[in-house]
Amino acid sequence: MASGRDVRDMLGLPMGGDAPKAAIQKRPKLAGGSRKIQGVAREVAALYGERPPPVAVYEEKKSYRAKRQNTGPAKKWEQQAFRIAARRDDLVLRHWRRKHATAPPVQAPDDTKMEDGENTDVQVPLCAEYEKYDVQVDLPTFTDDEYDVLLRSEDWSREETEYLLQMVNDFAYRWAVIWDRYDFLPFHKLYDGGESAKGDADQALAAMPFAPSKKRTVEDLKARFYDISAKLMKHRIPEVHMDAEQYSLYEMLSKFDPVMERNRKMLATALMNRSMDEVKEEEFLLTELQRINMAAVRLDAEREELRSRLDAPTANSSVSAGLQAFTSSQSLQALFQQLFQQDRSKKRASGGGTGPGRLSLSANDMVHTPGSAQAQLSAANRRQSMASQPVAQTPVKHLSPREEHRYNVSTHERLTSGVTFGSDKLLKMRQAKSNVQTQKIATALATLGIADVIAIPTSRVGDVFETLVTKLGKLLDVRKVREKEEGECRVLQNMKEGGGSGTPRGDNMSETPKPKSEIQDTPGIDADGEDDDDNNPNFGDDDAPGEEEEEDDADGDDDGDGMEDVDAEGEDESSVQQSRATSQGVGGQSHKRSASVFSQDDESEISTKRARK
Amino acid sequence: MNIPNSSTAPAAGEYAGDEVSAIVLDPGYSSTRAGFAGEDVPKSVCPSFYGQRDTDSGLHYAFGENAIHNPQDRLDIKNYWGSDGIVEDWDVATKLWEYAITDRLTGAKATDPTKNGLNDGNTNGDSMDVDIEALENNEKPLEESPLLITEPGWNSAKAREKYIEIAMEDWGAPAFFLQKTGVLAAFASGKASGIIIDVGASHTSVTPVLDGMVLRKGVQKSPLAGNFISNQIRQIFKQSSPEIPLTPHYLVKSKTQVDAGSPAQAAYKTFANPPTDSFRFNEEERVLTEFKESVVEVWPGPGRFSNGNNEEIARNTPGRPFEMPDGWNQVFSSERFRAAEGLFDASAALTSDTSPRPKDEHTIPRLVQAAVQQVDADQRPMLLANIVVTGGSTLLYKFNERLNYEINAIYPSTRNKLIAPGSVVERKYASWIGGSILASLGSFHQLWISRKEYEEHGAGIVEKRCR
Ligand SMILES: Nc1ncnc2c1ncn2[C@@H]1O[C@H](COP(=O)(O)OP(=O)(O)OP(=O)(O)O)[C@@H](O)[C@H]1O
Ligand SMILES: [Mg+2]
């Protein structure tokens, strides 16, 4: 119905009394129809028969489009003539605007102006709505004197200079366009510009040498224009009076170097005109370069780490059992810090290599380039030769069991990663999951008279120590159980004496004394079982160290970018390479862990000079 | 004004639209497009070919689709464009344009409906000719509307002045503007800068545009476009054995179904006064356009069609059938790739005595290269990232794939991007649409050349104002 009114409005038919009547007549019809489904939906619904439709049918009325607001009778529009404020002539155009007689006082600025126009009736209203698009270009201007004193040039006539400024104005500093359209014909200009010429000898001379039109490059044009601008600027505002912005502008203008610009453009052109092969080659070389850089960074980090590892224990062993260097907790703290830093920087170095940027290529990109694979292999070799296992490359020589014993050579089923130190291993064994347990172990060991640092931790010492610690663990477990039972007994006893009520649990008590007797000969250990429950598996198990190792592995994988990076790299290399790479990472990890042990135990690690087996 | 009502105009800030019922005229070799600025398609599209009859009562012209396809004796079909892509026959051009404008746009007000040929085109062939005297006696057709005309990028200064003279003197337009098709096609795609590749009927052009201004030195054109493809198809037809008959619609009275490749069995019309050769040629052209639309395919790359075993690969793809108006039909296999290959590879073009081998520098890749070469080095990558493809002949199947391949082969190190409007209308009428956008902008009001300015400065003002 609204559209009907619109049509009427458009056709200019009078909005007679019959129009609203028609609307009123229509309304009930529509309302009646709304109950039924209309249009295609109705036919679709008919197809379903009696059964409900398999999917929900939405009525068209329920669509979420905003309803057309009824804002009263359709507004009247008319074609209004208007003038354009930005124009210097009185061009009159016509556009459609709301008719004002009926409309309320309106907001738009041009509309108010139009009302003014209507008042005077004869005048066509001015439309300033788009005046803001009439922008003028800022140009340097000069007087004749200024030109003579400052701007005279061997290469440029006054006419051409003015022509240049005109072009800059016309094309609003779009140099590419200015250069494209630049077509200065000195002769023509000389003839029709005769009246503007001042006619003095200088002028003629200045115009002389460039009579033939010469081809100017963008740089020539820019150089001239910037030169003029800079000189005029300096003339108007002496350098000392320029503010920062002005000075930087001045500097930019005066430092324009057309030769350098030209060279830069030549290079840019050359860069763009490379052939497909060159582009591919460049891409390939960039990949290579990046890969080599990454490898170098990684290698450096590894070397650094190795060096620091070698350094730290020597300091340790130089004092052999004495640990003089680490007598104080501060020095230990410092060592820990140092190791920690190295660990972090290594991660960052290898992680930073694959940062974002055009040059970054994922490892997969490199797979298909045979050269890179080769380079990777060679890099791997290098790493092998320099890094942790020089043994791997010495020829295999068989030793007799006696010699083996003598040189302390051992063979292993499976070697854990990297370099580990016996002392580390021993230290690790002292560690339980909870601090409390660790302390308990420590006190137990202390009562046994075993020093905190065992001087020469050979593998056999390690083995023995391991069995000792295992046993200790078991003992501690049992003691814990005993304490629990005892406690329960006490409670029950109390209940019996106090409440006098018997409980069936009394039966169980007969079994508890057994462990009690075993533990009795470990005196001086405080019962302090707060959170003991979680520490057992580690020490209850026979191959606890092994498990520790595996845990480390897991840690290594979870670790952030640094670790991932190593792994990703490794995927493309041979499996050997991979295992090495990951184990490298794990080595670092365990190292860190042992470092943290230092810091944790520094209080208890009071030097014991006694060399214990 | 911001009442949420569909009948209110959008706020002026949204887009600087302010329509002044300007008319946009986009003349091309194959069709002349006209319509009101602000609309999204030209209301009036009429062929640029016109009929000319030399009767006893003088020269008679026939304009419009209906008139020029009606077989009449002594009806010569001509085109007002010159071979250099600049309007040649100004008198007829003026009339034809006026017909295009008055036919559907300003209509009844401009000319007497009994005289302007609008109503008698379908009924009576003899009276369809536009009575020139009647037109001239009428009031000027464009008194109300500013006029924007499009021009090719290589238009001569003289031709440009002619445009404004026609608009001002003959049609009485209150304001006028001239803009290059390239710039407008870029506007239609929402770009102010880019390289516009326009493959029309008579000419292919490559136009570098920077901030709405044509870089003149870079403008390239070549005659390898729609008409060239038509010629190639004619030669394919001729060189195939047996020769493929090209029978236009008007010659066929009735046809019967025949097997593929077998001769047509159709009843042909006979004419007491057979139409002219130019009429037949134009009618054949319609069949060829159909053929282009439904059969011709561009080899999409990689490589040229003649390279390696590309031809072999093409032969193994399913063919496309085509039926002539007289019922002759065939499935076209690899030869359908031949027709347009010349656009990209001059050595692959079919040649004959009348159509020599095209020049290498006229192929589209070479045009693009030449155009880019003429642009300031700093702008090149930006332009290559905005390659606007327009013109009817770019609708050829797989045209864009090939173009993309060719451009990437020339400039492998830049990010090249083709912008090709998906819809046929937008591709064919891009320059008109761009004109429609431009002329309906409020910010464009100040750019019009007004009648007063024209009277003050003369026709030379176009050079100054329409850069
Ligand atoms: N679907 C199509 N496939 C191939 N070619 C087509 C198709 N539609 C039209 N053409 C061709 O496009 C040409 C017309 O294109 P367009 O309308 O862009 O030319 P124009 O602007 O009139 O000519 P010019 O730009 O040369 O002055 C004709 O040669 C026609 O055969
Ligand atoms: Mg065109």
Image: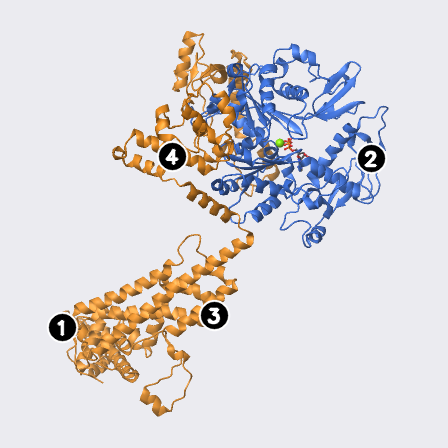
Chain of residue at mark 4? A
Chain appearing in blue on the rendered image:
B
Q: Are marks 3 and 4 in contact (CB under 8 Å)?
A: no
Residue A277 lies left or right of residue A233; in this view the side is right
**Residue matched to label 4:** A227
Badges 1 and 4, same chain: yes
Q: Earlier in the sequence, mark 3 or mark 4?
A: 4
- Write down the residue under mark 1: A497
In terms of secondary structure, where does tag 1 sit? helix
Judge: label 1 CB < 8 Å from ligand 1: no
CA distance for labels 1 and 4: 111 Å
User: In what element is the residue under mark 2?
Assistant: strand
Residue B255 is marked as: 2
A106 relative to A317, above or below = above
Q: Report, in whole angstroms, how far the alpha carbon at label 3 lies from the one at label 2.
A: 73 Å
> Is circle 3 on the same chain as circle 4?
yes
Are the residues flagged by discs 1 and 2 from a single subunit?
A: no
Say what amino acid the circle numbered 3 marks. Ser
Residue A574 - label: 3
Amino acid under disc 2: Lys
**Helix, strand or loop under label 4:** helix
Q: Is there any visible trace of residue A374 in the rendered image?
A: yes
Instruction: Name the colour assigned to chain A in the rendering.
Output: orange
Bin the neighbour count of mark 2 within 10 Å (Cα to Cα): few under 14, some 14-19, many 20 and up: some
Earlier-in-chain disc, 3 versus 1: 1
Which amino acid type corresponds to the residue marked 4 in the rendered image? Answer: Asp
Q: Quadrant of ligand 1?
A: top right
Question: In the image, is B75 to the left or to the right of A235?
Answer: right
